[in-house]
Amino acid sequence: MRTILSSKCAVAAILLLPSFCMAQAPKNLINKSRIPSEADDVEKFVPQGWIIEERLTGDLNGDSVPDYALKLVEDQPAKDSNDVAMERQRALVIVLQKSGGKLSRAAVAARLLQCTRCGGLFYSFSESPANVQIENGVIVVDQDHGGRNLTNTTYRFRYEAPSGQFILIGFDYTDADRATASVVSESTNYLTGGRIVTRSKGGRDVKSRRTIPLKKTSIEEVDSEKFEEAVSKRLGLY
């Protein structure tokens, strides 16, 4: 009997091990110290082991000079031998350009963008999106993931001259149950402190509003996983 129980425990441990290891596996996050504070070429802000997945250009600090938002990804094979997308970490590097052409590192966001295989069952065989745009000088990051429940998040950051940082000014979160068509969303304006929660089901929306304490959060401080954990708890989703 003792041997049987031991065998069952061993099997259970083996079944649980993969998910535990996935949760505990260390991420190869970008190392800010390996990125120069100044350079004469935007390519020099890409450290060894990383490549540019997308380069965006726009005036980010209001001086009418084009700046750069570099979406980086680990320099690893995108797919394995079975043509299945591989997990690669992402990072966002913001580079400001002065009138003379001099370039300076403004921010390195290591935990904002989801990895290429963090999209859940909805993106089982393809890379997960991490969409970055520049809209009227504001950096907008939009990404989604999930399975039956599809989660979408949108972050907005704006340059603050006194601190020289890109500050979070807005965060939108939506959780949609694709089986029941039930949708729960939260929209927060960090400039005013206004937060609106909307719960939709059967074509009916129920909204609630509240004011939260104003707090400045830079783009480098945002951890998308922790942000989602916090909002899902607030909304009673998990």
Image: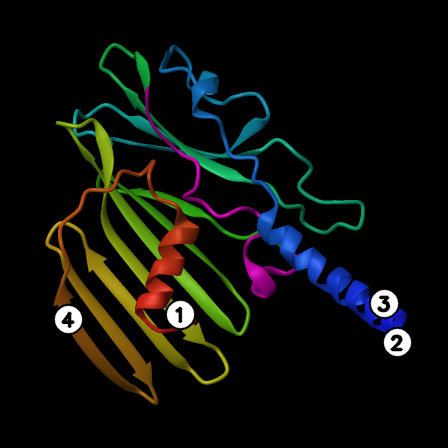
- Distance from disc 2 to disc 3, alpha carbons, whole Å, reads 10 Å
Q: Please tell me in which quadrant of the rendered image residue 17 appears.
A: bottom right
Residue at image coords 34%, 89%? 202
- Of callouts 2 and 3, which one flags the residue occurring earlier in the amino acid sequence? 2
Residue at image coords 72%, 51%? 84
Callout 3: SS: helix
Q: Of tags 2 and 3, which is closer to the observer?
A: 2
- Of callouts 2 and 4, which one flags the residue occurring earlier in the amino acid sequence? 2
Q: Residue beneath label 3, please?
A: 7
Q: Residue beneath label 4, please?
A: 209
User: Which colour style is shown?
Assistant: rainbow
Q: Pointer 3 and pointer 1: residues touching (CB < 8 Å)?
A: no
Callout 1: SS: strand
- Distance from disc 4 to disc 1, alpha carbons, whole Å, reads 18 Å
Q: Which residues are magenta?
A: 105-125
Q: Residue beneath label 1, please?
A: 175
Q: Of tags 3 and 4, which is closer to the observer?
A: 3
Q: Position of residue 44 (x, y in %)?
A: 46, 16
- Distance from disc 3 to disc 1, alpha carbons, whole Å, reads 40 Å
Q: Is residue 156 left or right of residue 183?
A: left
Q: Pointer 2 and pointer 3: residues touching (CB < 8 Å)?
A: no
Is 114 colored magenta in this rendering?
yes
Name the residue type under label 2. Met
- Of callouts 3 and 1, which one flags the residue occurring earlier in the amino acid sequence? 3
- Of callouts 4 and 1, which one flags the residue occurring earlier in the amino acid sequence? 1
Name the residue type under label 3. Ser
Q: Is residue 218 left or right of residue 3?
A: left
Residue at image coords 58%, 41%? 26
Callout 2: SS: loop
Residue at image coords 47%, 68%? 150
Q: Residue beneath label 2, please?
A: 1
Circle 1 crowding by C-alpha within 10 Å: few under 14, some 14–19, many from 20: many
